[in-house]
Image (cartoon, rainbow, N blue to C red):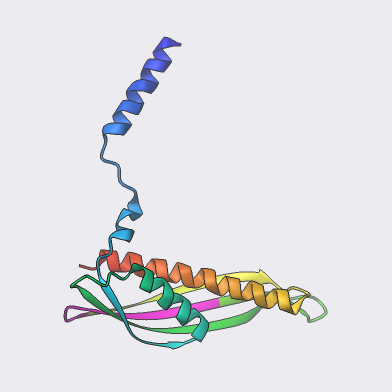
């Protein structure tokens, strides 16, 4: 028993003294002034992405990053029942970013998909779809911020 306690104390001591950092610790250290040059496509998703990017922008920074993006939103029928009625949908958001920083230009694309079942209440389905758009836009924004943290 005493041996086990001693081993646990030693292991905890080693873990406390190692230089562990979370993988995404640099995500909040983005020190850029983000300027959204232009965006096109789905208005709701673009506004959500722009709002998320403004949170990470540092107005006092000297490094300026220009971002342009285009968003395509589609809602496809995924499955039908034997009567021909729609039972499942798939939403697909494809966002293409163009990042300009110090005479360098980089473009990349982010694709997010989500499957959901059709609801009997149209109002609830619209609200659910709006929440899906919001969550997918947040995910796209996080991927862009991680990409900015990697760009030197």
Compared to residue 21, the image places residue 32 above or below, namely below
Q: Give x and y (percent) for residue 33.
A: 26, 74
The foreground one among 96 and 53 is: 53
Which residue is located at x 32 percent, y 68 percent? 147
The foreground one among 83 and 102 is: 102
The foreground one among 116 and 66 is: 66
Q: What span is colored magenta in the figure? A: 92-104
Quick one: quadrant of the C terminus?
A: bottom left
Q: Give x and y (percent) for residue 107.
A: 31, 79
> Is 26 inside the magenta-drawn segment?
no
Q: Residue furthest front?
A: 60
Q: Residue furthest top?
A: 2
Residue 107 as seen in the image, left or right of residue 60: right
Q: Give x and y (percent) for residue 126.
A: 67, 78
Residue 49, picture quadrant: bottom left
What secondary structure is the magenta-colored segment mainly? strand
Which residue is located at x 74 percent, y 79 percent? 122
Q: Give x and y (percent) for residue 40.
A: 43, 89
Compared to residue 80, the image places residue 56 above or below, namely above
Residue 89 as seen in the image, left or right of residue 14: right
The foreground one among 8 and 130 is: 130
Which residue is located at x 62 percent, y 70 percent? 115
Residue 110, picture quadrant: bottom left
Count every numbered label the image shows and give the total.
0
């Amino acid at each position: 028993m005493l041996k086990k306690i001693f081993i646990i104390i030693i292991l905890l001591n080693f873990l406390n003294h190692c230089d562990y950092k979370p993988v995404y610790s640099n995500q909040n250290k983005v020190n850029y002034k983000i300027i959204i040059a232009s965006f096109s496509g789905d208005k709701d998703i673009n506004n959500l992405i722009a709002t998320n990017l403004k949170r990470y922008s540092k107005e006092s920074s000297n490094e300026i990053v220009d971002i342009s993006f285009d968003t395509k939103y589609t809602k496809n029928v995924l499955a039908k029942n034997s009567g021909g009625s729609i039972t499942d949908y798939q939403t697909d958001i494809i966002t293409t970013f163009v990042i300009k920083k110090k005479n360098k230009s980089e473009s990349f694309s982010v694709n997010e998909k989500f499957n959901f079942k059709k609801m009997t209440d149209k109002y609830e389905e619209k609200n659910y779809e709006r929440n899906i758009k919001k969550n997918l836009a947040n995910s796209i924004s996080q991927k862009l911020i991680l990409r900015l943290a990697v760009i030197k």
